[in-house]
Image (cartoon, grey):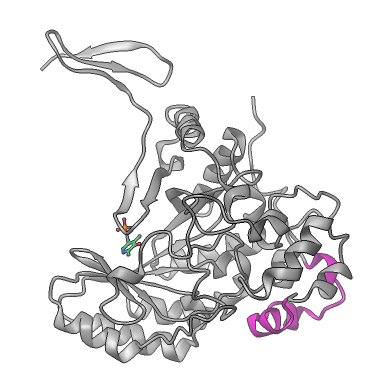
Amino acid sequence: MEPRDNRQNWFRGQGLWADTPDADWQNWVWQYKNRLVTEEQFAARMRLTDAERAGFAQAGGRLSVAVTPYFFNLINRDDPECPIRRQVIPVGAESVASPGESADPVGEEGTMPVEGLVHRYPDRVLFLVTNQCAAYCRYCTRGRLVSNAREYNFQPRHEAALDYIAAHSEVRDVLLSGGDPLLLTDAKLDYLLGRLRAIPHVEFVRIGSRIPDFMPQRVTPALCEVLRRHGPVWMSIHVNHPRECTEELFQATERLSLAGVPLGNQSVLLRGVNDDAETLKSLGHRLLMMRVRPYYLYACDQITGSAHLRVPVKRGIELIRSLRGFTTGYAVPQFVIDAPGGGGKVPVNPEYVETLDGAEGVVLRNYKGELSVYRE
Ligand SMILES: *Cc1c(COP(=O)(O)O)cnc(C)c1O
């Protein structure tokens, strides 16, 4: 039997920054200002591989590098293949373009009625409120516009987007993303949420954020009070590996839950990070302990320079099959591919129906491979 995961082995503490006063460590502005951003800052704390040095050499023109001290502590610095490291430290392979890849892999540019507002589905919009993040995921689907590393001069236009939403009564669900919306000040979030919640046809707001994962210190009681006041506000966080489930993240998600924010998680299936069943299962279990429901598992978008991180779709389906039935249904995310060109998210599932229109009924195969018949 697997040992029970009871949080005693979850990472906590200040690690390499043990000498930093607690008041600084717990302060998100300190975490933000002390991010590691240059090759020298990383090299002073870990031995970079040749591939990583090559990655730093060209990251400046592609997607900035930034890692908070809090998140850096989760890296196993002795392991060049560390699953945390692979998510945030650049490698030379990022400059290799492969067939099928592009700078806007899910076709967002074609469905923006206002700069930064993606209206792809009939009843909901994606509102990009900033182009900055606390740290940069190397497989970012919006690498073209986040971090200001490229020509694209993204200017979020909050007022124009709010006007568009107010004028479109079919929009009942607004998803704030970016960049990371939780980098906005409490006052700015209070303003945006207040404006959105005052629009009669907007039923609720969602926030997509990796800040709880990269910088849980941002989830202050004051921020939680803003979210509570404008509820229902849902939040999708982004955790890819069970090691990211720390005591600090646990406490941040608890504060959010107690403020009435229902939490989901969106993971990206990444080679060498979470492409095995035990890792995904442990991640699902830890998320549920934090009151976070695994929502989507994304096949990695075909962003230019991501081939080294992508996993075959077939493998993703096998991984879902190895979870379904073998663990809590809540722990199993929906595997999706965000269709190239702007088609939206397409669910991709293992097949459990053997025959749908057989003479004796629907023939089903369960998680153990056993057949049964559902007579109609
Ligand atoms: C992902 C996404 C949404 C939200 O999709 P759900 O399946 O409702 O979570 C909305 N708009 C765009 C453009 C998206 O990419």
Q: Residue at x 50, y 52 (%)?
A: 267
Q: Residue at x 64, y 64 (%)?
A: 248
Q: Position of residue 35 (x, y in %)?
A: 72, 77
Location of residue 156 (image quadrant):
bottom left
Q: State which region is magenta.
A: 14-35
Q: Is residue 66 visible?
A: no
Extreme-top residue of the structure? 360
Q: Position of residue 121 (x, y in %)?
A: 23, 62
Q: Quadrant of the N terminus?
A: top right
Location of residue 59 (image quadrant):
bottom right
Q: Is residue 274 visible?
A: yes
Camera-side residue of 288 and 316: 316
Location of residue 251 (image quadrant):
bottom right
Camera-side residue of 264 and 78: 78
Is 75 situated left or right of 265 in this image?
Answer: right
On whether residue 28 falls in the magenta region, the answer is yes
Q: Position of residue 356 (x, y in %)?
A: 18, 20
Q: Position of residue 266 (x, y in %)?
A: 46, 55
Camera-side residue of 103 and 200: 103
